[in-house]
Structure formats: structure tokens, C-alpha cells
Image: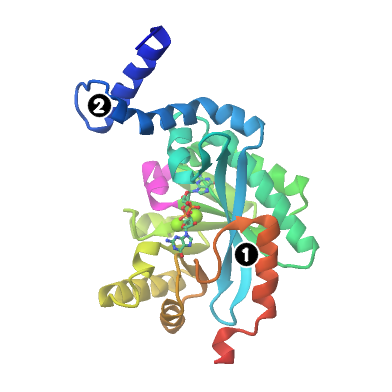
Amino acid sequence: GEDVHDTLRRADVAMYSAKEHHSSYKLYETALDRYSLRRFTVLNDFRKALETEQFVIHYQPVVAIKGEQVRGAEALVRWEHPELGMVPPNDFIPIAEQSGLIGPLTHYVLERAVAECKRWRREGRPLSVSVNLSVRDLLDLDLPGEVASILTAHHLAPEALNLEITESMIMSDPDRALDTVTRLRDLGVGISVDDFGTGYSSLANLKRLPITELKIDRSFISSLPHDESDEIIVGSTINLGHDLQLNVVAEGVEDEITLKRLEKLGCDLAQGYYFGRPLPSQEFVVMVDRLSAQPARAEAS
Ligand code: C2E
Ligand code: MG
Ligand code: MG
């Protein structure tokens, strides 16, 4: 480097690269810089971004398969970074988790999503909203209290809010997860298990938790039209969910053939590009109104 600052920064870039490749050392080279600089910038800018509202939330419709009515939306966060442009959540959520900054972000998303959901309902759209939690949130003993006060502040019925957790979050500390999830459920909010089928949760653990919904991971859904074994897996997951009195949602529904298969298998709800991509709230409601005005494709054909 030309100066101390630059030298340290390059050392940092080399260190990240070494860690990433599980090697004990790495020599700096400019090719390494692009990704690492992004990572470095992301971490540095994160706190500022929360204060200046650079995080935006997009909403993707969740649709009842029978009748094709929009029932709710999943809130998905994006970062409008002044230099990097739109940063997707998979690029910054892990960094936020590692650096202990996820709590304030979750709080922000919850607050915004609850406020928007209240607005939709006030305007005559009886929708619910789902918010993703991260593993740290589930270990946070204050979370149920925070959720309760956000709901009260916005006068939103708890049934209108769903919190999404993953199997790996449950498995990282099953007892703590049980405690937090039970307290959240006692508030009256719904609890979904997201990306279901990709983790290693045992049925015993799942049965213990007061969950209300399973979201079958996209990886099983996308191959549904041409993979017989995935059809068997999806079918038995739907049955398992129903036996446990849970709603079952299919993620990543991209075409009509897939939707028809899911309908035949008895799946309750679907989410995916076929119905709509995640959009800012104002555009989301336009999409919802358009979908509601359309006679259900299933009945029309
Ligand atoms: P997820 O919760 O499983 O969200 C679904 C992801 O699948 C979203 O990606 C969505 O845009 C994408 N998707 C939806 N329909 C389709 C489809 O038909 N085809 C394909 N190929 N993809 C589809 P996104 O928005 O990039 O979010 C990625 C992940 O980031 C989410 O996965 C979630 O785990 C995490 N995430 C998003 N927002 C938040 C948040 O506010 N807090 C936390 N902790 N995590 C979040
Ligand atoms: Mg989710
Ligand atoms: Mg998912």
C-alpha cells in the first residue's frame, strides 16, 4: 500500500480471502479486492444505512391456490446502497448477523411491515404480512416484547403477522428456540418454518414447536414438473403439514404447470414469480388489486 490505511485495508482483504479458502495465509492481489472491498464497505456503511433509511422493503404476494386470492405478502428487505446500488439480502444479512447488527435491522423491517399491513387492511385489503427472522433474533429474549409493542403501536391484529424461522435456527439451540417461539405464538402471531426441507430439524423438534405454517423450499418446487421424486417429497410434506394442522406454502412457483401440480397435491398457498415478484408497497397493492379483479384462472379454464 501507499500509506498505512491502504496497507491495512489490503491486509484485511488478504485475510478475508485466506479465511474464505481455509488457508493459513494469502498474498494480496488486486483481483481479490473487488469482492472484499464490497464486504468491507458493506460492514462499514451498515449502521449509517439504518439511520438514513437506505433499507427498503419489497412485498411478494402469497396466494391461496384454490380461487387464487392473495392472502398476504412476504416482506423482503433490500439495501439501496449509494455506491453499490441495490444489494440483495443474501449479500448483507450474513454480515449483519456476524457483526451483531441484525437486531436493529429486524426491528426496522418489523416496524415497516406491520405499518404497511395495517394500511392495506385499512384500505379494505384483508392481507397478512410475513417477516423473516434471523438466528440471532431467536436467541434475543426481548424479541417477543418488541413484537408486542410494534403490534400495539400500529393497532394491528396479531393474526395478521407471521414470523418466518428456519430449521437451522431451531437446531442451533432447540430449547431457547422453543422458549422464544412459544412466547411469540402466545402473542397470537403465526410462526412459519421457511425453506422447509433444506435443514436438518427432526420431526420431534418440529412437533414440540407451536408452529402454524410450513414453507416448502423452492428447490423442491422448481423441479416439480419434471422430477418424480420431488413430486413424492412435496406430496408427503404437504400431507405431513396437514397432519400437524399446518398451512402449507410452496415457494418459488414460476409457472402454471407447477401450480396445477401443487393444487392436485392439496397445497394451500403459493408464492413465486408466477404471481408476482417482490415489489415496493405502492406497486404491490396495484398488483394485488389486479390479481383480485381477475377471475381465478383455475375457474376460467
Ligand atoms: P426467503 O425468505 O426464502 O425468501 C424467498 C426468496 O426467494 C426471495 O429472495 C424471493 O425474491 C425469492 N423468490 C420468490 N419467488 C421466486 C421464484 O419464483 N423464483 C425464484 N428463483 N426466486 C423466487 P430475496 O428477496 O433475495 O431474499 C433472499 C433471502 O434473504 C430470503 O429467503 C430470506 O432468508 C432473507 N431475507 C430477506 N429479507 C430478510 C429480512 O428482512 N430479515 C432476514 N433476517 N432475512 C431476510
Ligand atoms: Mg422467507
Ligand atoms: Mg424461503
Find disc 1 in the rendering and name its residue: 72
When asked about the image quadrant of residue 188, the answer is: bottom right
What residue sits right under mark 2 in the picture? 18
Q: Type of residue at label 1?
A: Gly
Q: Do tag 1 and tag 2 residues touch (Cβ < 8 Å)?
A: no
Span highlighted in magenta in the image: 166-175
Is 203 displayed left or right of 272 in the figure?
Answer: left
Q: Relative to residue 87, is residue 159 depicted above or below?
A: below
Instruction: From the viewer's side, name the closer residue of 226 and 102.
Output: 226
Quarter of the image that includes the C terminus: bottom right
Magenta stretch containing residue 59, yes or no? no
State the mark number for residue 164.
none
Can residue 157 be seen in the rendering of this structure? no
Q: Is residue 89 above or below residue 59?
A: above
Q: Amino acid at mark 2?
A: Ala
Few, some or many C-alpha atoms within 10 Å of disc 1 (few <14, some 14-19, many ≥20)?
many
